[in-house]
Amino acid sequence: MALFSLPGIKISGISAAVPKNREFTAGYKWISARERESLVKNIGVETRRVAMKGTTTSDLCVAAAGKLLDELQWDRAEIELLIFVSQSRDYLVPTTACIVQDRLGLPHSCMAMDIGLGCSGYVYGLSVIGSMMQTGTIKKALLMVGDISTLTTCYRDKSTYPLFGDVGTVTALEYDRDAPKMHFNLQTDGAGYKALMIKDGGARNVMSRKSFEIKKIGKGIYRSRLHLELDGIEVFNFTLREVVPNIKKLLSFSCESLPAIDFVVFHQANRLINETLRKMLKLETEKVPYSIREFGNTSGASVPLTMIAALKEPLATGRKKLLLSAFGVGLSWGSAIVETDRICIPDLIDYDG
Amino acid sequence: MNIEEFIKHIEAEFDDLKPGILKADSNFRETFEWNSINALILIAMVKTEYDVTLSADDLIKSKTVKDIYSLIENRIS
């Protein structure tokens, strides 16, 4: 069982960059005014950041990292580990993390690699980077998590287009013998892989002329095989079935309880899912921050973005115990309990590229 | 639990649905606007109130409020 604890790892800073360009649900003319209203009220997205063509996830992550390293006053030569978690890489080949190592001016002694996860990416990324730092040999590391999801949604698909927003985040981690343990519970069910997928363009279905044909799937839903497809009810039921037991198992494993947790930061799937989870766990509204209204569903980066957008003040000034829970594409899900102490959080960057 | 209580829960979730209009034998797709978001709202309510999961298939096969209610009743017992 992927249920484990990692001592000695401290989150020193978190930073994010979002494209300056905004789109508003109120301006989404593909659906009726009534549907737009229902979307804002139930799915919870009022506005989203949408990258201009040519901007990549790594551009956003590099901008966020530059500012964070400056504010932390970290020497780039000391960073020995870089992990880039994304489903929107710069190229099919090579690995984006290699390019980022050079762009950020990190040393050649830095190991760098990508992890191809979406919604669950932040929790998974933290666990991988934390595990690699266990020996204390690697003292400083960067975890980049981000996605430009808007590139692969079709305007005429009401089930995806108005939901997703773009962001790149970076988390700076440090080896610290006295840091409280982080606890993780990570899970997978690949039988559900079709619930969220892009069918063509990989090795299974090589891209062909057919991949570009836009077809009608249902009412208000048109897309090609290169667009993201999302089975809303399937994902919804998966989440309601798996997330609460996953969290409860983590709590009992780590001898923690919900009243002792300051904030529960959920992946920003949609408001209805998250509110249902909140009610199932009987959590007060003050304990469950949101960023979906302003930024939409920002894939794997939604957990750190919510920490920055909604919890900057408490996280920057004090000691807090957080439960992070993320779930989705894969299907892959997991939760983590993390204690933070005065995290360096620079202002959100509006990326004008 | 009873079906009146189930109908009250549905009425509480859907603002446009005036109380008293929805009956046990109402075709829910015709009585109020039916779309994928409303399907999610119904699934969420049933999960929170009864701890029962409704699948897409369950909804496709159901026609009336009572059809859904029977599914829930069967899965609780």
Image: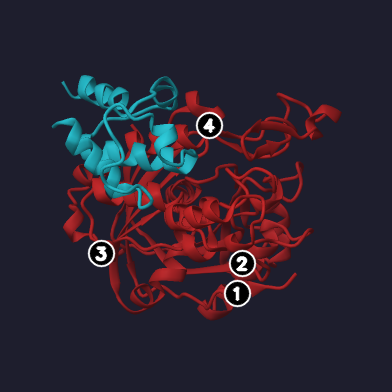
Chain colours: A red, B cyan
User: What is the C-alpha distance between the residues marked 2 and 4?
Assistant: 27 Å
- Dot 1 corresponds to which residue? A349
User: What is the C-alpha distance between the residues marked 2 and 1?
Assistant: 6 Å
Task: Tell me the SS state at disc 1.
Answer: strand
The residue at the point 28 percent across, 25 percent down is B66
The residue at the point 44 percent across, 34 percent down is B30
Residue A18 drawn above or below residue B2: below
Contact, mark 4 vs mark 3 (Cβ under 8 Å): no
Residue A331 x/y as whole percent: 48, 34
Residue A260 x/y as whole percent: 18, 60
Discs 1 and 3 carry the same chain letter: yes
Q: Is residue A328 left or right of residue B11?
A: right
Along the line of sight, which residue is nearer the eye, A271 or B15?
Answer: B15
Residue type at the position of mark 4: Ala
- Dot 3 corresponds to which residue? A262
Residue type at the position of mark 1: Ile
Task: Tell me the SS state at disc 3.
Answer: loop
Residue A327 x/y as whole percent: 43, 43
- Dot 4 corresponds to which residue? A195
